[in-house]
Image (cartoon, helix red, strand yellow):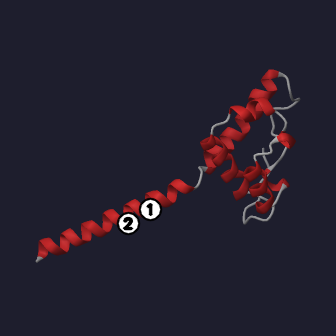
């Protein structure tokens, strides 16, 4: 009887763990996104294409809906540095989107790039 209870509890724990991992995999990593976003502009600056290492567009320059449209259409022309943006993987783009979306103008914690 005790073995059945312990086995049931363990089974429920395993199922909940898989659900948690699956849900976490859907979104990007905000911290990696911030790093990647800055890395794009640093590489662009080193190439001489922009005047500053600081990203030209802050996260609070757009609303969450606007960031979603930009990343759904994959139109990164307004950011400049097209060469660097084209080199980014889907995972890096998801991380950058997560960072920008989380700190958009209408988010609970809007942020400017520093």
At a point 10% along the width and 77% down the height, the residue shown is 1
What secondary structure is found at the residue carrying circle 1?
A: helix
Residue 107 spot, x, y in % from top left: 74, 64
Residue 70 spot, x, y in % from top left: 78, 51
At a point 63% along the width and 47% down the height, the residue shown is 95
Residue farthest bottom in this picture? 1
Gap between marks 2 and 1, in whole Å?
A: 6 Å
Residue farthest right in this picture? 51
Name the residue that disc number 1 marks.
20
At a point 46% along the width and 58% down the height, the residue shown is 22
Does the rendering let one see residue 56?
A: no
Residue farthest left in this picture? 1
Q: Quadrant of the C terminus?
A: top right
Does the rendering let one see residue 46?
A: yes
Give the vertical position of 9 relative to 82 (above or below).
below
Residue 92 spot, x, y in % from top left: 63, 41
Near-viewer residue (76 or 36): 76
């Amino acid at each position: 009887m005790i073995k059945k209870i312990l086995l049931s509890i363990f089974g429920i724990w395993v199922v909940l763990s898989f659900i948690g991992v699956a849900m976490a995999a859907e979104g990007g990593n905000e911290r990696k996104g911030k790093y990647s976003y800055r890395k794009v502009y640093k590489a662009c600056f080193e190439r001489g294409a922009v005047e500053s290492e600081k990203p030209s567009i802050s996260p609070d320059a757009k609303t969450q809906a606007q960031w979603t449209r930009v990343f759904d259409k994959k139109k990164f022309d307004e950011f400049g540095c097209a060469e660097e943006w084209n080199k980014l993987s889907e995972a890096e783009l998801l991380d950058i989107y997560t960072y920008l979306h989380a700190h958009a103008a209408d988010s609970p914690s809007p942020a400017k790039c520093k």
